[in-house]
Image (cartoon, rainbow, N blue to C red):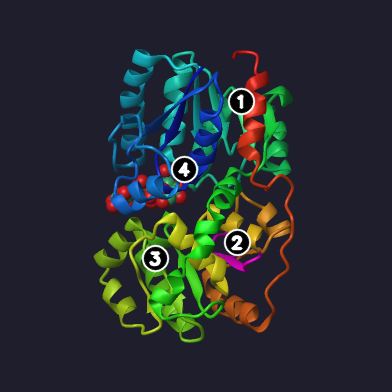
Amino acid sequence: MVIHLVCAARPNFMKIAPFYRALKKEQWAEPIIVHTGQHYDINMSDVFFEDLGLPAPDINLGVKSGSHAEQTGTVMIAYEKVLVDQRPDLVVVVGDVNSTMASVIAASKLGIKTAHLEAGLRSLDRSMPEEINRLVTDVLADMLWVPSRDAFDNLIREGVSPGKIHLVGNIMIDSLEMLRDKMEAQQTYKEFGLEQKAYGVVTLHRPSNVDDPIKLKKICDILCEISEKVPIIFPIHPRTRKNLEANQLFSSLEKCQTLFLPEPLNYIRFMNLVFNCRYVLTDSGGIQEETSYLGIPCITIRENTERPITITQGTNQLCRLDQATKKVDEILQNPMPLQKEIELWDGHTAERIITVLREASFK
Ligand code: UD1
């Protein structure tokens, strides 16, 4: 059974790695890695393949950046050619980036079976490009592999037949557990002259936070102020860097003595920072989950989340920008939260997907 694993952007690589590894052990499965090229910088792509022990992609569509329609359309055109040529038995797409939606559309129109890994998440906010990608992907995919019960319920509410949905757990936790020893062995924070639990980690890249110059300026001011209480490490995503530079804000951030601004870090080094930090402030999806799993306080600068379980059962709280300073103060005044177990976030999601595939009727 030839299975394409489509990946595109930084958060996708962690999701395909444990699944690729598990498929490689199966006689009946031939996994092929397809990289659309949406993320192409070495530190946004290659270093992740290296950390995750993934081979170089079998196929690279080389699509790179563009407007949403350009990026989606270019992936569809490029991937359709590959699909016509190779006709895999199954196309697996992950997450919610433009390439996820583009690939599932291309495959579905050719009558090729598809599966969505991390299906069913909903922010109910269609101003987010990812929400559109999730909705379209889940309408089209033949199999929907969900990380949590709320995702299962979302799909049922949308009228999806229960037979298509499989509650398999959170694949990101498989990646984390797969590399935990290496993550723990690092001391990335020491490279910044910092001590365990005596710094915060910040990541911000969502258009809703970083594309508006006024909001971005506010973010810079707040981060500078917060970093005076406890130093901050803020690895800068390319979108954020571009906008900071275009608005002459990067140099003002650099002036804050206790705010460190490295380039995006590889997965293992970044996760070592998260393991040892006092709190995280982010707008990422995956980091809300990783901090919940690790029992690290997380402030999410967004109005909503497609991962509500990180609030109800984890350590995450949504926060408006103007409340961020107060929230950080609260976290610093309180002890670290207790780690709680979340159902099926256990490092065995890839195995459960293999079982689903073994039993799938079209195998
Ligand atoms: C994309 C995903 C987002 C995900 C994020 C993780 C969509 C709609 N968004 O957002 O869900 O959370 O990836 O990082 O698919 N750029 C580079 N080098 C790269 C990649 C991008 O310089 O390797 C620059 C480009 O100038 C590009 C900008 O960053 O215009 C944004 O990249 P893009 O892939 O469009 O979206 P992200 O913001 O990364």
Amino acid on which the number 1 mark rests in the picture: Met
Instruction: Determine whether 300 is above or below 130 in the image.
Output: below
Q: Residue at x 56, y 77 (%)?
A: 197
Q: Which mark is residue 291?
A: 2
Q: Are marks 3 and 2 in contact (CB under 8 Å)?
A: no
Q: Is residue 320 visible?
A: no
Disc 1, SS: strand
Instruction: Determine whether 91 is above or below 21 in the image.
Output: above
- The residue carrying pointer 1 sits among few (fewer than 14), some (14 to 19) or many (20 or more) residues within 10 Å by Cα, namely many
Residue at the disc numbered 1: 143
Disc 3, SS: loop
Compare marks 4 and 1 and give the one earlier in the sequence: 4
- Separation (CA) of disc 3 from disc 2: 17 Å
Whether residue 78 sits left or right of residue 160 in the image: it is: left
Q: Which percent across, then down, holds residue 39?
A: 34, 45
Where are the magenta residues, as a range? 295-303
- Separation (CA) of disc 2 from disc 4: 18 Å
Q: Nearer the viewer, residue 203 or 51?
A: 51
Amino acid on which the number 2 mark rests in the picture: Thr
Magenta stretch secondary structure, dominant: loop
- Separation (CA) of disc 3 from disc 4: 18 Å
- Separation (CA) of disc 4 from disc 1: 18 Å
Compare marks 3 and 4 and give the one earlier in the sequence: 4
Residue at the disc numbered 3: 235
Amino acid on which the number 4 mark rests in the picture: Asn
Q: Which percent across, then down, holds residue 113?
A: 53, 18
Whether residue 164 sits left or right of residue 71 in the image: it is: right
Compare marks 1 and 2 and give the one earlier in the sequence: 1
Q: Which percent across, then down, holds residue 84?
A: 36, 14
Which numbered disc, 1 or 2, marks the residue closer to the eye? 2
- Separation (CA) of disc 3 from disc 1: 35 Å
Q: Which mark is residue 12?
A: 4
